[in-house]
Image (cartoon, grey):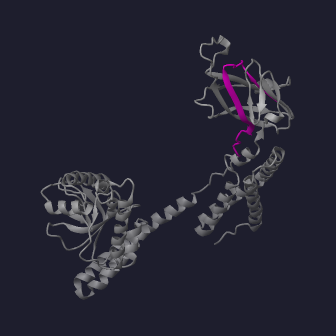
Amino acid sequence: MMIPVPTIHLRKLSVLTCCGFFASATVAQTTTDPAPLAVARAVFLRQVMTDSQTLTDQYERALAKVEQELAEVADYEEARLVKQRRAELKALYPTNDVGIAQSLAFPLLPAQARFIGSAEARGDLITGWRTNGSGAEWTNLRVSPGKYYLELEANLVELPSLPGTLVPGRSQPQESALFEFFEVSLLAGAAENRRSFEVKLSHDDTTFESIQVGPVNFTRTPITLRLTAASGYPGNLLRIRNLRLLPAFVEAPTIATPAPEGPTLDELKKSMNEALAEVQKPILESYLESLRSLAGANPALKDATDAETKRLLKLMENSRGQAAGPLRILGNNGGLNGFEDLDGARFVADPENRGDRFVVEHENRRLTVRLLWLLCAPVDSSDKASSNAFAKHFGLGDSDVSSLGRTAQEFTAGYLEGKALRILIRPTKNKDGTSNALVFLPEIGLYQNVLVDQGLAAVVSPKDRRGMMENGLFESLQEREDAAKRQKPAPGAWGLSEASSK
């Protein structure tokens, strides 16, 4: 059963989406347009978005209901498409309308101001704040009603005094300058739009401090605004520039989604997977046991039953969704041949562990594994063969090897302890009783990569590589080692290496 998505609403969505893109593109074009034009455009765009919000809200609610119905009948693909359309609708109404607010910025230009006292305009600067009550006033500003911040840049430095000259107290340089910004009006609400701010002494005469004052709430238009100094500053050079009114960022109304009466799509999918896994588990285990019995009773069928067993294990793994990237590729290309697969193994703390060799436990069985294709520095200095090989690979002195061995030992223990490991081991053991292994971690992949990235292991060319996928994994390790060697600063042993410093 498939529940159709109402096409008439989808056509409305296309109109709304185009409107949203038009608004975003137009806002992005704010370059050098005159301030009145920028204000008019931004007001128009905001009005369009506001007028369409009710329709958008209703449509989003309808889509939420359709998505729920589709999920209940297990039509997950259609439900996903509906969910995607809901996300597109919500994207039309960002929470912080920064772009539109910037386009609404209203400049307070020095050339349009009337000056009071000693204040004066010099190009794009307002300066000359020597006397008490000096100020600048802008009259008949046609600003759209709403909340605004005053933004400006200011520089305050001391004027140098002549040597031996007695400077009166009022003419002493000040550490800060106080200002008031307010709406000039006797009407109700104007008194609440009075704000004070401070300009602090600058380090030099080229550094301007950015200041934001407010917000203030204008309820009428046009308005008259005034900026005045709380006192005179004859001992300082005080300059102000880039004054403008910036609309307070408006929190856009969010589209409220009704709480679903039943389970969500994600919950239904999770429940279905768990139910399937629960039903499949005894059937698959019984089939695996039958394959083992068949292989034991008829050795001629061993290869065929082994292949079927690997295929079945791969199917179970994919159904759990736990296969790491390289491991999945290895299995899909037949690279598991020649390995014993230990899924869910655990690292075991042991004093004989090293960075590249450690004890693991799997189903009450303990064994020592050695990371395939890697060599870490030994902890025991008596292992001359490994120490010399490691030192030669990195170009190190003997004194560096033992400390790097302890570092690798501690790193491996800290990284692997407590994690479920997927280990592929060679069935034949080395002379020291260890088994060569590839170690994988969920969401991480091959652990050999981690040691190489940290500069704690040397990549050692194998005597034999069995198959295309093993060649691919080994070549990837070599590439990672080359990348680690080139890093600045280089990690681990490469940071101490003479070869990396050349």
Q: Nearer the viewer, residue 17 or 112?
A: 112
Would residue 268 be found to the left or right of residue 422 on screen?
right
Q: Quadrant of residue 263?
A: bottom right
Q: Is residue 133 above or below residue 410?
A: above
Residue at 33% across, 59% down: 502
Is residue 229 rendered magenta in the image? yes
Q: Which residue is farthest bottom?
A: 300
Q: Main secondary structure of the magenta part?
A: strand
Is residue 460 rendered magenta in the image? no
Q: Where residue 37 sits: x, y (%)?
A: 83, 48
Residue at 61% across, 21% down: 175
Q: Quadrant of residue 316?
A: bottom left
Q: Quadrant of the N terminus?
A: bottom right
Q: Which residue is farthest front?
A: 163
Residue at 75% across, 46% down: 103
Q: Nearer the viewer, residue 36 or 469?
A: 36
Q: Where residue 230 sits: x, y (%)?
A: 72, 19
Q: Where residue 252 sits: x, y (%)?
A: 70, 46
Q: Where residue 279 sits: x, y (%)?
A: 42, 69
Q: Nearer the viewer, residue 485 or 502?
A: 502
Is residue 85 shown to the viewer in this render? yes
Is residue 97 shown to the viewer in this render? no
Q: Quadrant of residue 120?
A: top right
Residue at 68% across, 48% down: 254
Q: Which residues are magenta?
A: 225-252
Q: Is residue 190 above or below residue 32?
A: above
Q: Is residue 143 above or below residue 201?
A: below
